[in-house]
Image: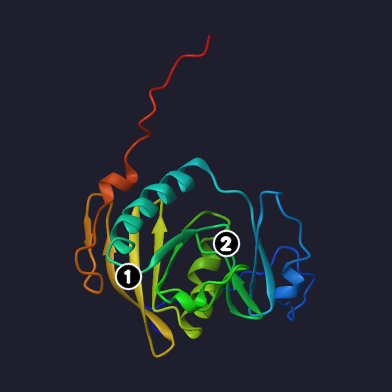
Amino acid sequence: MDDARLSLGSDMPTIARGRKDLEYADLLQFPEGDGNRYEILDGRLYVTPSPNVTHQRVLGRLFKILDDYFEPRGLGEVFFAPLDVILTNRDVVEPDIFVVDNADHLTERAVEGPPLLAIEILSPSTAKRDRGIKATRYALLGVPHYWLVDPKARTLTCYKARDGEYEPVATVAADGTLAHRDFPGLIIKMSEIWAASPVKWRRRR
């Protein structure tokens, strides 16, 4: 990959004890409801702690925009984590937001097959992984579109798969507007994504 493309990161799993052979059945043995997200990438386990308020605010706003675009047009169904996406038996992920455009991939246990679009909202604990191993596996395993949302820089970068790698097709700044050429009619005003909370703060007594 050249500098413009996403490359494989060097981050290590937090609790895998060096194992590189984990499969979906192993993932089912990990605890539920502990607030962590468990994923397997190329046979290795990765664990993500609970997201913060900004992460969830951005997720909710972006989900609503995408849901209003894809579902009325019959172009796909929009989901958000936690929900397993089984790309292979050794690659099971939970993208923050993703769009499924193939009904055959929807089963009772999970989404079984690559989504049309996967979106990750960066955090200090996931940024290296999202830009590295996760991007690499997504591209190799057939996820056509990959978006990275950076709350710190307030940017949205869109990638598209080509020859098993991702190439950037658009980067939108905090005050910009995304009009993606592969999704006609989809308009995302970033100022709406980054707007402050609508809740009026009250002084505690």
Q: At 19% across and 64% down in the image, what residue appears?
A: 185
Q: How is the image coloured?
A: rainbow
Residue 83, labelled with which disc? 2
Q: Is residue 7 visible?
A: no
Count neighbours of disc 1 (C-alpha within 10 A) and say few if under 14, some if 14 to 19, many if 20 or more.
some
In depth, the one of 116 and 38 nearer the eye is 116
Task: Answer above or below: position of 94 versus 160.
Answer: above
The kind of residue on which mark 2 rests is Leu
Q: What residue occupies the far top of the structure in this picture?
A: 205
From the viewer's perspective, tell me whether residue 174 is left or right of residue 139.
left
Task: Answer above or below: position of 151 versus 120.
Answer: above
Q: At 66% across and 80% down in the image, what residue appears?
A: 90
Residue 75, labelled with which disc? 1
- Residue 199 placement: quadrant: top left
Q: Position of residue 136 (x, y in %)?
A: 51, 79
In the picture, the quarter occupied by the N terminus is bottom left
Q: At 36% across and 53% down in the image, what residue appears?
A: 62
